[in-house]
């Protein structure tokens, strides 16, 4: 799942080999300007940029950051829901949840694959995630204390992700756009799964309905924050828009989400924890209250409720699995030196 | 159907119900154990692999539990059977309730059951019980993939590094004692076999032994000899692990009795 | 932190009999057999495949986009390869 709040140009270490890969160090300023204007012309014509095409270094770095953060978000996102697989309250819910969490892992795989076309390796990206250097969507630093949280995540978080991700299907970088097409096809099942859980709960016993309402209360504001800071605060959006890496502003997409979701909550018979939500006939949109951005920035900085646990879980999985990965490589190496015995 | 009596029906419903539960519970508990891995595997691709396996087993469990419920005739749904029976009523092999421990243990456990299920589901595809035969035919395809997965990994880990060999050898030494249960037919299995529902387990033992011996050789592992004395899960005698598995799995339904999910 | 790296394989899937294999992305794996399994797990969870090809990424040879002009422009001039180049009367069927 993708959040727009993390597209910060020039604020994070990216990859070691990129400058050499694009060869930008060895050309003159005039040549670079010419190449950049040709590049921009292609982007303006909605042509897709492919891995071996010339691209400005900043375009490459921004994409590496954005795509890898998106991939990390999918991987970390497997955990808050994954921890309910063993406790899902019916076999059908268990199966659907496993499939959903697998999809998220698969999305991470597509995205790491797309990022690798830009010159960064999976290992480098893993190191950045596990060391805490890389960012990922803050929403996954929130806990899932009840089954209803699984429903709320599917309904709200996947819902927000879909709104963020559909425009990316037309982003300028080919491998990312194609990965997003795959992702979007799979994502709508996720949101329906979540909504169905919420519907079943809200039509159930009073304690089930209360469980659903409590989850909505927990996830509403963090879901709005998935769209990133208000446009006025988003300093680097303009360049991303010019390069068609970002196609709509944060506030536009956030408003779309609110407009979609408020009637859905009404249908569920649940109330959104924002007393300022009101239909505005003149604008044709729902008005809403101010977001508390201090919470957002604390969570992004690493002080969210589960930041430590999420990263620790991934670190442990990675460390505990090192002997497995090494064994697989050792086995493959033995096979290469002995052509008689081949893996089946 | 052509109206001729189904020979499988000659087997008493009580026996068929028991037999289906054994198949169902083994898939259910194994699926539950594999579900624990999602998000914690050595690599992202293995997270997806375990997820696929878990889905296959949960899917088998659902079909078999539903069928078992309809044979029993007491209106118990797949969820009633999964979430509202206590440990002694479960009929899974003791092997599948053993903990994951590490990737090596999980692969060895998986490999032992995969070789068996391949042989069993192939035989069950010819069962006189038509519905069981259909379920088994589908499960066989899944099991063939599972066997490929676990065989390849067993080879990689057995013939990988010194550490990986040590871990899977240790796992094999610990888990082999749970395998005799596969082949020791009791009254239920004898009745099912006589009725043509299920195969003669003794006939599967030889094939299992030689396949496992061959793979262990390829993996440069020693195949330990099973000791006896492990609890026989298919008769409801379980290890201590099942209680914890059920406590986690059944918690929501127990905490909210009668609720819909 | 990590030094071991499973090599990268590109994945091509034929989703239905009669279609070509299409490039869908890449997977990491220690060997070719594992690459097939990973490709199946990552790219065919919705039955999108009857055939999977995996190729070590390092074995792929690609044309250089800079040479696109020399490689592809001459073909642009050769319109006689395109069916619309030929003027066939409407009454003639099946052409």
Image: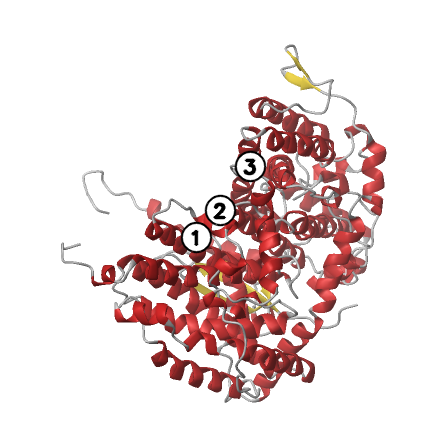
Discs 1 and 3 share one subunit: no
Residue A181 bears which disc, if any? Answer: none
Question: Which chain contains the residue that carries disc 1?
Answer: B
- In this rendering, position of residue A264 left or right of residue A219: left
The residue identified by callout 2 is: A92
Q: Secondary structure at mark 1?
A: helix
Rounded to the nearest angstrom, the CA distance separating label 3 from label 2 is 11 Å
Q: Mark 2 and mark 1 in contact (Cβ < 8 Å)?
A: yes
Give the residue pinned by disc 3. Answer: A197
Q: Which tag is nearer the camera, tag 1 or tag 3? A: 1
Front-lying residue, A69 or B33: B33
In the picture shown, does residue B138 fall above or below B114? Answer: above
Where residue B62 is drawn, which disc sits there? 1
Q: Identify the residue at horizontal 51%, vertical 74% (top origin).
A: B111
Residue nearest the observer in this picture, C8 or C46: C46
Crowding at label 3, few (<14), some or many (≥20) Cα neighbours within 10 Å? many
Q: As drawn, which residue projects farthest toward the left?
A: B3
Asked if residue A28 lies left or right of residue C77, the reply is right
Residue B161, position in %: x, y? Answer: 67, 83
């Amino acid at each position: 799942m993708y959040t727009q709040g993390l597209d910060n140009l020039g604020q994070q270490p990216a990859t070691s080999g990129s400058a050499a890969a694009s060869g930008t160090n060895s050309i003159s300023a005039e040549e670079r300007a010419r190449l950049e204007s040709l590049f921009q012309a292609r982007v303006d014509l909605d042509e897709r940029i492919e891995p071996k095409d010339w691209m400005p270094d900043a375009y490459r770095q921004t994409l590496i950051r954005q795509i890898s953060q998106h991939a990390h978000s999918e991987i970390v996102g497997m955990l808050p829901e994954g921890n309910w697989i063993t406790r899902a309250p019916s076999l059908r819910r268990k199966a659907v949840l496993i499939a959903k969490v697998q999809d998220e892992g698969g999305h991470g795989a597509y995205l790491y694959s797309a990022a690798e076309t830009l010159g960064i390796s999976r290992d480098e990206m893993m190191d950045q995630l596990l060391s805490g250097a890389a960012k990922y969507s803050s929403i996954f630093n929130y806990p899932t204390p009840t089954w209803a949280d699984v429903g709320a995540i599917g309904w709200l978080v996947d819902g927000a992700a879909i709104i963020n991700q559909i425009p990316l299907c037309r982003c300028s970088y080919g491998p990312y756009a194609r990965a997003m097409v795959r992702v979007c096809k799979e994502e709508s099942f996720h949101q329906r799964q979540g909504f169905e859980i919420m519907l079943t709960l809200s039509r159930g016993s009073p304690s089930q309905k209360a469980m659903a309402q409590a989850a909505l209360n927990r996830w509403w504001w963090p879901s709005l924050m998935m769209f990133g800071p208000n446009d006025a605060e988003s300093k680097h959006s303009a360049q991303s828009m010019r390069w068609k890496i970002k196609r709509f502003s944060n506030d536009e997409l956030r408003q779309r989400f609110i407009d979609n979701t408020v009637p859905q909550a009404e249908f569920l018979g649940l109330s959104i924890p924002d007393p300022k939500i009101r239909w505005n006939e003149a604008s044709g949109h729902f008005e809403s209250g101010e977001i508390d951005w201090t919470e957002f920035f604390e969570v992004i900085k690493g002080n969210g409720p589960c930041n430590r646990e999420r990263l620790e879980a991934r670190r442990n999985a990675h460390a505990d699995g090192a002997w497995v990965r090494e064994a697989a490589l050792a086995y493959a190496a033995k096979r290469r030196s002995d052509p008689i015995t081949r893996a089946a | 159907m052509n109206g001729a009596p189904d020979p499988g029906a000659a087997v008493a419903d009580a026996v068929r119900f028991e037999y289906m539960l054994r198949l169902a519970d083994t898939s259910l508990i194994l699926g539950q154990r594999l579900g624990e891995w999602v998000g914690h595997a050595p690599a992202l691709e293995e997270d997806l692999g375990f997820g696929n396996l878990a889905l296959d087993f949960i899917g088998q469990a659902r079909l078999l539990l539903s069928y078992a419920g309809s044979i029993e005739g007491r209106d118990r749904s797949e969820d009633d059977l999964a979430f509202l029976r206590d440990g002694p009523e479960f009929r899974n092999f003791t092997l599948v309730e053993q903990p994951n421990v590490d990737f090596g243990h999980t692969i060895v456990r998986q490999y032992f059951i995969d070789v068996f299920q391949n042989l069993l589901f192939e035989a069950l595809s010819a069962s006189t019980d038509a519905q069981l035969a259909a379920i088994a035919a589908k499960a066989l395809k899944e099991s063939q993939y599972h066997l490929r997965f676990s065989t390849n990994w067993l080879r990689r880990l057995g013939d990988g590094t010194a550490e990986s060999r040590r871990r899977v050898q240790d796992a094999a030494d610990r888990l082999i004692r749970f395998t005799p249960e596969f082949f020791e037919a009791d009254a239920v299995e004898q009745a099912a076999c006589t009725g043509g529902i299920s195969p003669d387990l003794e006939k599967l033992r030889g094939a299992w032994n030689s396949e496992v011996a061959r793979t262990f050789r390829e993996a440069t592992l020693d195949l330990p000899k099973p000791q006896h004395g492990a609890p026989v899960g298919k008769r409801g005698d379980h290890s201590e692990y099942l209680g914890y598995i059920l406590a986690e799995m059944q918690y929501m339904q127990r905490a909210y009795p009668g609720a819909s999910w | 932190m990590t030094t071991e790296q499973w090599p990268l394989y590109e994945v091509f899937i034929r989703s239905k009999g009669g279609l070509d294999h299409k490039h869908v992305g890449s997977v990491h794996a220690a060997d070719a057999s594992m690459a097939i399994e990973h490709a199946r797990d990552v790219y065919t969870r919705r039955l999108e495949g009857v055939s999977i090809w995996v190729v070590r990424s390092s074995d792929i040879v690609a044309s250089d986009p800079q040479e696109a002009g020399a490689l592809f422009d001459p073909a642009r001039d050769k319109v006689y390869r395109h069916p619309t180049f030929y003027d066939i009367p409407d009454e003639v069927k099946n052409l």
